[in-house]
Amino acid sequence: MKKFFVITAALLSLNFMAANAVELDSNGRDPKYVETIVQRSKKVTDALKISDTEKGKEVLNIVANRYFKLNDIYSERDSIKAVAKTLTGDAKKQKMEFAEMQKDQKLYKSHFGFIADLSVYLTDKEIETVKDVLTYNVVNVTYSAQCDMIPTLKEEEKVQIMAWLKEGREYAIDAESSKKKHETFGKYKGRINNWLSKRGYNLTKEREEWAKRVKARGGTL
C-alpha cells in the first residue's frame, strides 16, 4: 500500500510539472536574439548538469525568460527616457524619475518571481549555482582572493565579506549588462575594502605581500 502511494504521488508530480511546463517567451522576438539567449541560458543548466533532462528544459526556459524580461524592463525605461528628453523643466525631471521608479518596481517583482520559479525545480544550493553562473562567479572568486590576500582574516570578518558579496550578487542579477554587473560588485568591493581599512588592515601592504606569495607559487595577479 505504501509503495502504491509513493508511485501515485510521483505520477501526480510528473503530471503537475507537465501541465505547468514553462514556455519560452520567444514570440515577437528576433530569432537570432532568442538563440543567443538560449545558448547563454544553457550555461546554467550545464553547470547544474541537467541540460539533457526534462527539468533542465524547464530551468533553461525560466532563465531565458528572465533575460527576456530584463531586456523588456530596460527597453521600456529607455523609451520613457527618450520621451523625457524631448521635454523641459519639471516635466522632464518627473518623466525621468518615473522611468527609474517604474524600472525599479518591475525589477523587484521580477527578481523574486524568478527565484520563486526556480524553486519549483531546484534546491536552494542549486539556485545559488544559478546566481553564480549569471554573475560570472564573482562572489566566489572575490571571496577566495580576499582570504588569500589577507590570511589573518577573522572568521566573523569572512562571514561579513561573504554576506556583502552575496548582497551585491542579488543586485547584479538584475543589472542590464555585464559592465553594470561588474560595477555593482565594484561598489561592494569598495565597501569591503573601506571596512577592512577601518578595522586596521593595511591593504596596500597586504596586496604587496600577497603578490609576493602568488609569485612564489608561480602565479600572477
Image: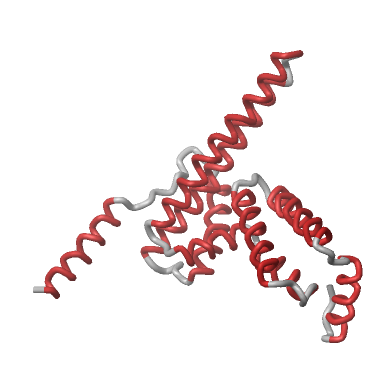
Give the x, y percent position of residue 124: 46, 63
Number of numbered markers: 0
- In the rendered image, residue 39, in percent from the top left (x then y), is placed at 55, 59
- Residue that sits furthest to the bottom in the current view: 217
Residue 12 place in picture, x, y as percent: 20, 60
Query: Is 43 in front, or is 159?
Result: 159
Q: Is residue 118 visible?
A: yes
Q: Is residue 109 above or below residue 160?
A: above
Question: Looking at the rendering, in which quadrant would you find the N terminus?
Answer: bottom left
Q: Give the residue at x 76% y 13%.
A: 89
Q: Nearer the viewer, residue 117 or 42?
A: 117
Q: Residue at x 81, y 56 (%)?
A: 194
Q: In the image, 76: left or right of 207?
A: left
Give the image quarter of residue 104.
Answer: top right
* Res 138 seen here: no
Q: Is residue 48 above or below residue 178?
A: below
In the rendered image, the vertical position of residue 196 relative to residue 208, given as above or below: above
Q: In the image, is 183 to the left or to the right of 75?
A: right
Name the residue at 12% across, 71% down. Answer: 4
Residue 132 position, x and y percent, is 59, 62
